Amino acid sequence: MKEDIDQYLVARHFDLHAHEYETYAEVQREMAERLMARLAHVEGPHRTSVRAVLDIGAGTGVLTRLLFERYPNAEITALDISETMLERAREQLGATQVHWIQADVETWKCPRRYEVIASNAAFQWLNRPSEVVRKLSGCLEDGGMMAVATFGPRTFWELFFAFRQAGDPAPRRGPTLPPMRFWSEAVHACGLQVEVLERVRMYRVYPSVRDFLKTVKKMGASHAPKSDRPLSRRVLTRMEAWYNETFAVPGGVQATFEVIVAVARKHP
């Protein structure tokens, strides 16, 4: 059974690490660039002028910046649960036609329709992703595009394996991430046409397990379950030993990021 994520804790984590997020968010930048490349390919070179764009989970503006470059004449709405992340985005972009909104997309009321709705590295924090997809499809103009890059269930599989081997009593340390099949079903259920649906594995090497966990924390990506499952020092020590022994590579230890990219069109 999927465990709900405490959205207050998610916002708190990102508030605390907003000042250093982009220093560690290398994977998120690569995801955003891949997402925009797929969106541009689907739209083609003769895309009609876009007037309204929505960025869900904008954070410090990694994707917002790319959207602004592609649609310089559009009015962009950038929404995020963390006010501090949005403050960083405002400082860095300073784009006058961007409307910054601090809100939880799961409870946010969509005020208008958009020709492009995009999201990067945000859907993994949602408790009801299928309901959000349905809501956002209703916010799309006819002919509009929905483009999402998010993490899949094989992300950090090495870490979860090491925790199991260490005897961790918690069923899982981390959010339950929807597989690629979910995106196909969720998009079709809303009457959208899938234009792109792909899964990519990205691999990163960290000097040690501690460095890997530190990077995850600095990205604000600490898990935030509503139940409290304290992690004992004994389990943590055993997990590190398993991880270091099993997933050692030249230069340190390996961690997997599974990225799912989906682009869909709303036909009349």
Image (spheres, rainbow, N blue to C red):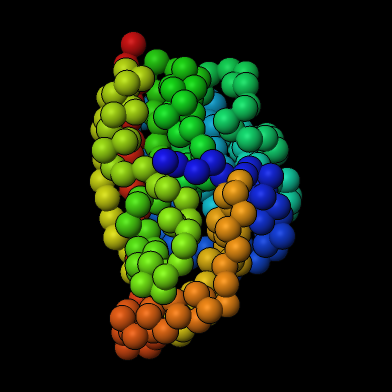
Q: Position of residue 112 (x, y in %)?
A: 58, 17
Quadrant where the C terminus is found in the figure = top left
Closer to us: 254 or 228: 228
Closer to us: 52 or 179: 179
Corner quadrant of residue 264:
top left
Total number of numbered discs in the rendering:
0
Left or right of residue 240, residue 19 in this image = right
- The answer, for residue 65, to whether it is visible in the render is no
Residue located 44% across and 57% down the image: 172
Q: Position of residue 9 (x, y in %)?
A: 67, 50
Q: Considering only vertical position in the picture, is 139 above or below 185?
A: above
Left or right of residue 70, residue 80 in this image = right
Q: Position of residue 91 (x, y in %)?
A: 72, 53
Corner quadrant of residue 148:
top left
Q: In this view, which residue lies farthest toward the top?
A: 268
Quadrant where the N terminus is found in the figure = top left
Q: Considering only vertical position in the picture, is 237 above or below 188?
A: below
Q: Considering only vertical position in the picture, is 210 above or below 124?
A: below
Q: Considering only vertical position in the picture, is 207 above or below 140?
A: below
Q: Position of residue 63 (x, y in %)?
A: 51, 48
Closer to us: 117 or 98: 117
Left or right of residue 122, residue 183 in this image = left
Residue located 38% across and 88% down the image: 251
Residue located 53% across and 79% down the image: 234
Residue located 35% across and 63% down the image: 157
- The answer, for residue 157, to whether it is visible in the render is yes
Closer to us: 245 or 136: 245
Corner quadrant of residue 54:
top right
